[in-house]
Image (cartoon, grey):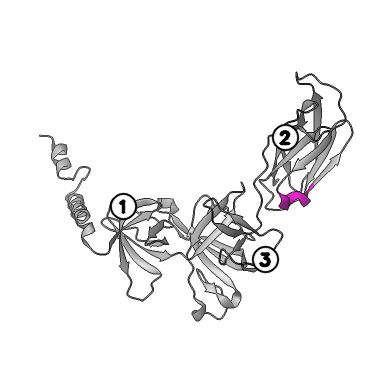
Amino acid sequence: MDINYFMKIQNAYGTKTKREKELAKVNREMSKHFEDTFDTETVLINEVEASLMIIKGTDGNTFKKKIKSCHDIKFNLGDYVTWNGQHWIVTLIDSDDKTWNCGYMYLCTVPLRWQNTDGKIIERWAYSEDYTKYSSGAKGNNTLTLADNQYGLAIPIDAETKKLHRDLRFSIDLDDAIIPDVYKLTNRKVNLNNNEYFNRGGIMLLTLSFNSFNPDTDKYVTLDNGSKAWICDYRPPAPSDQPETSDKKPICYGNITCRGKQSIVAGGATKTFTFTPTDDAGNEIEYTNFTWGYQISEAFEPYVTQTILSDNKCKITVGYDILIVGEHLLIYVADENGVRVTSISIEIGGGL
């Protein structure tokens, strides 16, 4: 007799005790009838379709919903639930998932947008709760305190949000505001609700304090989906490390070299670069009627100093700013007609 066969047809395969067999039977029956209740809805959990039981609370808080799913459909802290055209974030889960998966989700009302170190615009929907009626200006977790002009936001812990640091600035206003309200990140708490160590996600709590709008660096830009929004301290896309195309051929060719790695430390020592002119066959030639130049995001141009030396050399110094670390500086040589001959991309590091 093949006992495994009978366990499989009874959906008890893999169980070891009578208790586990009964639990598997209960989960199977619950899954069969999960769709029978009016509370069960078809939603997207992190863009994947799933069935979720969405239950109204008894406390009158319409921003909060209790949620349940079948044993086989798990949700984690920080998961986004798209339901009824709205964005919700899972903020609480019950780690005891023998039968139901249970938790709470809260309605997101704030789209938080910023640029990462590669210049890509990142967006995360955040939940914010107004505790002003309980406070006279004291700071608190997950609160919006108008007297202190602070937001408390809950967002997922993920690869991008882990890189958020104090003093980053965000527009917290209507997307079409003429002059948006701007807030600066002043505090972050990552371990108040973090279940990552047993693979059930995590929530990060941010405190944002009111800051001033900067018309020189805060830009109204077009997002990938075609909509427009304000991005604070916006940096244009990094320049390509390829020479600009031109109908004209350069008078000469060549390459730019430097000692050590192709990197420079922000706030560190000067680095020297050497241009070696060649003909189109790669043979070194004498050519002195060329010019040095560099290209970087407009916001960081004041931090770069280029000094021209003799003997086909120039030296570069980069001032320190926390946001410039990770950027790339394009150094190039152009001939007497302004046609780029060659270029080199240098990464800006932060030192020790």
Badge 2 or badge 1: first in the primary sequence: 1
Question: Can you identify the residue that label 3 sits on?
Answer: 213
Q: Is residue 31 left or right of residue 263?
A: left
Question: Can you identify the residue that label 2 sits on?
Answer: 344
Question: The residue under label 2 is which amino acid type?
Answer: Ile
Position in image of residue 82 (x %, y %): 39, 58
Tell me if residue 302 is in the magenta stretch.
yes
- The local secondary structure at tag 3 comes to loop
Position in image of residue 296 (x %, y %): 72, 45
16, above or below 95, in the image: above
Question: The residue under label 1 is which amino acid type?
Answer: Ile
Question: The residue under label 3 is which amino acid type?
Answer: Phe
- The local secondary structure at tag 1 comes to loop
Position in image of residue 159 (x %, y %): 52, 49
On residue 18, which mark appears? none
274, above or below 98, in the image: above
Q: Is residue 159 left or right of residue 84?
A: right
Badge 3 or badge 2: first in the primary sequence: 3
Question: Can you identify the residue that label 1 sits on?
Answer: 73
Residue under the image location 79 percent in, 23 percent down? 278
Tell me if residue 245 is in the magenta stretch.
no
Residue range of the region highlighted in magenta in the rendering: 297-304
Task: Judge the density around disc 2: few (<14), some (14-19), many (≥20) Cα neighbours within 10 Å.
Answer: many
Q: Is residue 270 visible?
A: no
Q: Nearer the viewer, mark 3 or mark 1?
A: 3
Residue under the image location 15 percent in, 45 percent down? 10
